Structure formats: structure tokens, C-alpha cells
Image: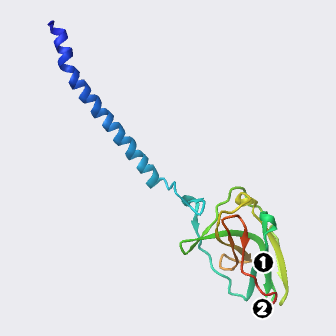
């Protein structure tokens, strides 16, 4: 047997072993990369929203005796709330709002899909009076995933002056909320 032929036959098993080692390392690195992506990239979803897009709420509840509750969902295009002033003073509020979702006992802002533009107007509500406002779901992509939500209607002032109307979105996309007596009871 010529010398070059014997070298080829003797080195063939070594090449095959080296190829197997390279393949095992490639599979290991690919698996490790996939696990790293799933763990550190926050690719998971919570109630249909990307976990990394949910920002915890850091705002206070208004201290005035103001009632805010849902009265209509406008075929899913917006949510109408009724605001009642049960105080002896004029209540001033703006049209700015946020929609928030309850996840694991904590409230989070629902992320915007579209830009949220509101009129920068102030409204006055006399003592004992009520008014309704409809808040669009357009900034949230026109729909909400199933879950327990609230709309934060803002009184004029700082972020410690918010009033909430809570509601649910069911698995079939219907809106539901606790019915409130017209007298605010």
C-alpha cells in the first residue's frame, strides 16, 4: 500500500471524530442561545401584552368624593364613563386618560399601539352634577385583550388626582362592569 493511501485511511476516523465534536458544540451553542433569548429577552406575554411593554403604575388616587363608573362600551370603539361630583365644591378635570390592566395583583399601563392625542381642555363639574366622556380605544389598537381593566380619569393637578372606572373584557371580547346606582351608591 502506498504511503499516501495509508495516511488517508488512518486519518479518516480522526476527521469523523472531530466532525462529531464540532456538530455537538454547534448544537450546544444553538440551544444555549435560544434559552438565553427566551429568558433574557422578555419574550413572554401577559394577558396578551408583551411583558417588557407593561409599566407599573406609580400614581395616587384622588381624595375628593368623585364617582367614576362605566356606562357604555360603544361596540368596542371606546368606553363611556360617567363622572359624578358628590362634593360641595366645583371639580375640575381634563380629558387625559390612561387604560390600565390588573396583573398579579398590581396595576400596569396598557401599552399604546397608536399615538394618544386628547384635547387639552379643562372641564368644571358643579357640586352634585354629573357628566359623561367617551374615551377611545384607538390608541390601544382598537381592542383590549381579556382581563380586568380600569380607566384613569385625571383631575387637574398632579398625578395624585386620579379617579378610576373598572371594567372587564371577557374571553369573547365583551365588556362588563359593575352596575352603579344612578345616585352613585
Tell me the residue at 84%/79% (across/down): 131
* Place of residue 27 in the rendered image (x, y in percent of width and height, measured from the top left): 36, 39
Crowding around mark 1 (Cα neighbors within 10 Å: few <14, some 14 to 19, many 20+) is: many
The image quarter containing residue 135 is: bottom right
Q: Earlier in the sequence, mark 1 or mark 2?
A: 2
* Place of residue 34 in the rendered image (x, y in percent of width and height, measured from the top left): 43, 46
**Local secondary structure at mark 2:** loop
Between 92 and 44, the one lying in front of the other is: 44
Q: Is residue 122 left or right of residue 21?
A: right
How many numbered markers are drawn?
Answer: 2
> Visible in this render: residue 118?
no
- Residue 162 lies, with reference to residue 115, above or below; the image says below
- Which residue is label 1 attached to? 93
The image quarter containing residue 164 is: bottom right
Q: Is residue 183 left or right of residue 103?
A: right
Residue sitting farthest toward the front = 172
**Inter-mark Cα distance, 1 to 2:** 14 Å
Residue sitting farthest toward the bottom = 88
Q: Are marks 1 and 2 in contact (CB under 8 Å)?
A: no
**Local secondary structure at mark 1:** strand
> Visible in this render: residue 26?
yes
Q: Residue 87 shows which numbered tag?
A: 2
Tell me the residue at 76%/59% (across/down): 138
Tell me the residue at 31%/37% (across/down): 24
Tell me the residue at 14%/7% (across/down): 1
- Residue 117 lies, with reference to residue 71, above or below; the image says above
Between 81 and 96, the one lying in front of the other is: 81
Q: Residue 61 shows which numbered tag?
A: none
* Place of residue 160 in the rendered image (x, y in percent of width and height, measured from the top left): 65, 79
In which quadrant is the C terminus drawn?
A: bottom right
* Place of residue 104 in the rendered image (x, y in percent of width and height, measured from the top left): 53, 72
Crowding around mark 2 (Cα neighbors within 10 Å: few <14, some 14 to 19, many 20+) is: some
Amino acid at each position: 500500500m502506498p504511503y499516501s493511501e495509508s495516511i488517508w485511511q488512518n486519518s479518516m476516523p480522526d476527521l469523523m471524530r472531530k466532525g462529531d465534536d464540532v456538530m455537538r458544540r454547534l448544537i450546544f451553542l444553538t440551544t444555549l442561545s435560544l434559552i438565553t433569548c427566551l429568558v433574557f429577552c422578555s419574550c413572554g406575554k401577559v394577558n396578551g401584552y408583551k411583558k417588557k411593554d407593561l409599566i407599573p403604575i406609580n400614581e395616587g388616587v384622588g381624595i375628593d368624593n368623585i364617582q367614576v363608573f362605566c356606562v357604555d362600551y360603544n361596540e368596542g370603539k371606546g368606553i363611556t364613563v360617567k363622572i359624578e361630583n358628590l362634593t360641595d365644591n366645583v371639580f375640575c378635570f381634563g380629558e387625559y386618560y390612561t387604560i390600565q390592566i390588573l396583573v398579579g395583583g398590581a396595576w400596569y399601563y396598557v401599552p399604546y399601539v397608536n399615538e394618544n392625542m386628547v384635547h387639552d381642555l379643562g372641564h368644571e363639574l358643579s357640586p352634585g352634577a354629573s357628566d359623561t366622556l367617551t374615551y377611545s380605544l384607538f390608541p390601544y389598537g382598537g381592542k383590549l385583550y381579556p382581563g380586568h381593566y380600569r380607566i384613569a380619569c385625571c383631575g387637574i393637578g398632579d398625578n395624585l388626582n386620579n379617579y378610576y372606572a373598572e371594567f372587564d373584557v371577557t374571553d369573547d371580547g365583551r365588556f362588563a362592569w359593575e352596575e352603579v346606582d344612578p345616585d352613585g351608591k
